[in-house]
Image (cartoon, coloured by chain):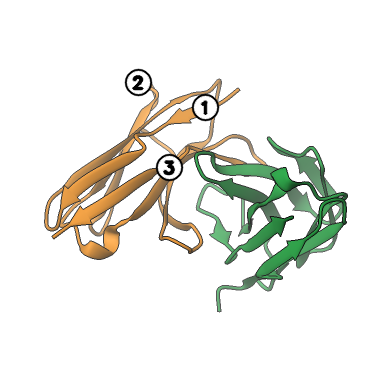
Amino acid sequence: GQSLEQPSEVTAVEGAIVQINCTYQTSGFYGLSWYQQHDGGAPTFLSYNALDGLEETGRFSSFLSRSDSYGYLLLQELQMKDSASYFCALGSSNTGKLIFGQGTTLQVKP
Amino acid sequence: DAGITQSPRHKVTETGTPVTLRCHQTENHRYMYWYRQDPGHGLRLIHYSYGVKDTDKGEVSDGYSVSRSKTEDFLLTLESATSSQTSVYFCAISESSGAEGYTFGSGTRLTVV
């Protein structure tokens, strides 16, 4: 089977940098994705890593190391609106199934 | 404008009754998915579809069935609702194999009493 682990909660200060880690176990996968979800809202796609290395999208970056079964989401210049839950997800097959981690709640404080 | 809508947005139903949730897309995407979200469990895949009349089970499919007779509609049916199926249900679509990201609907909050 497949499983992903993320910290349940992270707290950081406005303007700071925060890293949300994701470790996984799988026999094979297509890529690692990240989603953001605000309270009461729907998840929205942030980033995708098909290959090892860093992908940058504005203030957000995502990293993947297949050899270490590890990835992370890096959020820079934190803003209050970044307070949300963040999910990593494994793309498990060519049917596009995503298996999600349990999510990390990020609280940004002034 | 997101191209995916779920209905109803909220529903309260009694134990033992059948319930159907609808997901409608205007993006002509091939892939559609149903997830449920519960505290402490993240998003769990119930069923998914990779084309008209092509569906398969996900992680938590027991007690649920799906149908996709048209590209734009993916229906989730709870044959006989139970309290354990109280949850928020999200539909998602993707254009290719999902690698580039899903677009999620706004969700249906279902309460089984």
The tint chain A carries is orange
Same chain for mark 1 and mark 2? The answer is yes
Please tell me whether mark 3 sits on a helix, a strand or a loop: loop
Whether residue A61 sits left or right of residue B28 in the image: it is: left
Q: Is residue A53 above or below residue A84?
A: above
Q: Earlier in the sequence, mark 1 or mark 3?
A: 1
Identify the mark at residue A3; answer none if there is no mark.
1
Q: Quadrant of residue B113?
A: bottom right
Q: Is residue A64 visible?
A: no
Q: CA distance from mark 1 to mark 2?
A: 14 Å
The residue drawn where x is 57% and y is 61% is: B104
What percent of the width, then of the height, locates residue A33?
A: 45, 44
Subunit ID for the residue under disc 3: A
Identify the mark at residue A68; answer none if there is no mark.
2
| Kind of residue indicated by mark 1 | Ser
Same chain for mark 2 and mark 3? The answer is yes
